[in-house]
Image (spheres, helix red, strand yellow):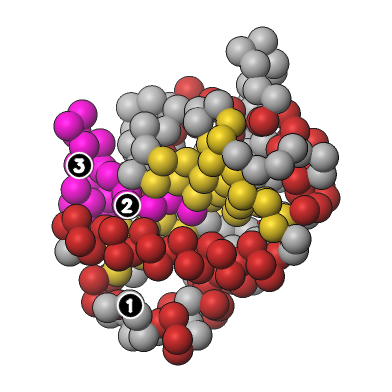
């Protein structure tokens, strides 16, 4: 996986740069096919980026009716639950920009049956996203975080979903958290036109080091199992970067 690394002093500058990058990818996608299909990351790191996108000087550069918002994964909670990735995005971004409600595609995990929710979301991706030559639904941008254990989206170590190469969305029981999740799978992330990782915090140092010193012999973390065909960028704050050499491309 060829990753272009950028290192920032702090979360604020990381988020500001991510907002500029989001805008440039938005413009590129609009020029390419008139819409911008983006999968949001959950967790805490991307919140500041989402808040920045609501700032008038940024938001007014976006034709929000051309933006379609999806989610890379969701927890098994209602949409108004404090743990909901949808709720975080709604509070930080979606309630503050003029995006049509019909352009927001929530993973409906409150349905109770997580496999049913995954099937429903997979069909939604198939119905709304353009597909690659291989017939895989293609996002213009997938935003991702990385956990200290090397998970990304809800692709956690030692879970069945890591073997999922057919389905585009799947339900996964995450024993480490004793809970179910619904997540996009490797095929969908690998076929995205752009993947942008936002990684901050000293607890990510070890996993960042392992990713960047990747050799085919090192134990494979889920994030190292990705084989994106599109462009992959990773924005790190200095806490997460630790002793990583100066930014540049890594393979
Ligand atoms: C989630 C995310 C998950 C997250 C990482 C990093 O639902 O929690 O999909 O993959 O991006 O755990 O989370 P932080 O940004 O909070 O460190």
Q: Is residue 81 left or right of residue 165?
A: right
Residue 128 percent across, percent down from the top left: 21, 55
Q: Which residues are magenta?
A: 122-143
Residue sitting nearer the eye, 11 or 64: 11
Q: What residue does disc 1 label?
A: 62
Q: Name the secondary structure under disc 3.
A: loop
Q: Within 10 angstroms of label 1, few (less than 14), some, or many (20 or more) residues?
A: some
Vertical position of residue 215 compared to residue 231: above or below: above
Cα separation between marks 3 and 2: 11 Å
Foreground mark, 3 or 2?
Answer: 2
Residue 177 percent across, percent down from the top left: 71, 45
Foreground mark, 1 or 3?
Answer: 1
- Which label is found at residue 140? 2
Q: Earlier in the sequence, mark 2 or mark 1?
A: 1
Vertical position of residue 43 compared to residue 99: above or below: above
Residue 100 percent across, percent down from the top left: 28, 79
Q: What residue does disc 3 label?
A: 131
Residue at left offset 40%, top offset 67%: 23
Residue at left offset 76%, top offset 48%: 240
Q: Is residue 228 visible?
A: yes
């Amino acid at each position: 996986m060829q990753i272009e690394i950028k290192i920032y002093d702090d979360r604020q500058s990381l988020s500001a740069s991510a907002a500029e990058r989001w805008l440039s990818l938005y413009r590129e996608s609009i020029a390419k096919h008139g819409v911008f299909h983006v999968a949001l990351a959950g967790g805490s790191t991307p919140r500041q980026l989402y808040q920045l996108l609501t700032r008038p000087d940024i938001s007014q550069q976006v034709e929000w009716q051309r933006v379609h918002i999806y989610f890379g994964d969701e927890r098994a909670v209602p949409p108004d639950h404090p743990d909901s990735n949808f709720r975080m995005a709604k509070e930080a971004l979606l309630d503050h920009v003029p995006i049509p409600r019909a352009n927001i595609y929530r993973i409906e995990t409150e349905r109770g049956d997580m496999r049913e929710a995954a099937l429903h979301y997979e069909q939604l991706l198939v119905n709304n996203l353009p597909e690659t030559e291989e017939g895989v639904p293609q996002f213009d941008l997938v935003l991702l975080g990385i956990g200290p254990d090397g998970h990304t989206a809800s692709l956690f170590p030692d879970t069945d979903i890591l073997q999922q190469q057919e389905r585009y969305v799947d339900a996964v029981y995450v024993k480490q958290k004793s809970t179910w999740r619904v997540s996009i799978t490797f095929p969908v992330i690998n076929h995205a036109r752009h993947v942008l990782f936002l990684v901050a915090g000293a607890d990510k140092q070890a996993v960042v080091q392992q990713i960047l010193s990747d050799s085919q012999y090192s134990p494979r973390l889920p994030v190292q199992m990705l084989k994106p065909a599109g462009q992959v960028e990773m924005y790190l704050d200095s806490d997460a970067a630790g002793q990583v050499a100066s930014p540049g491309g890594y393979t």
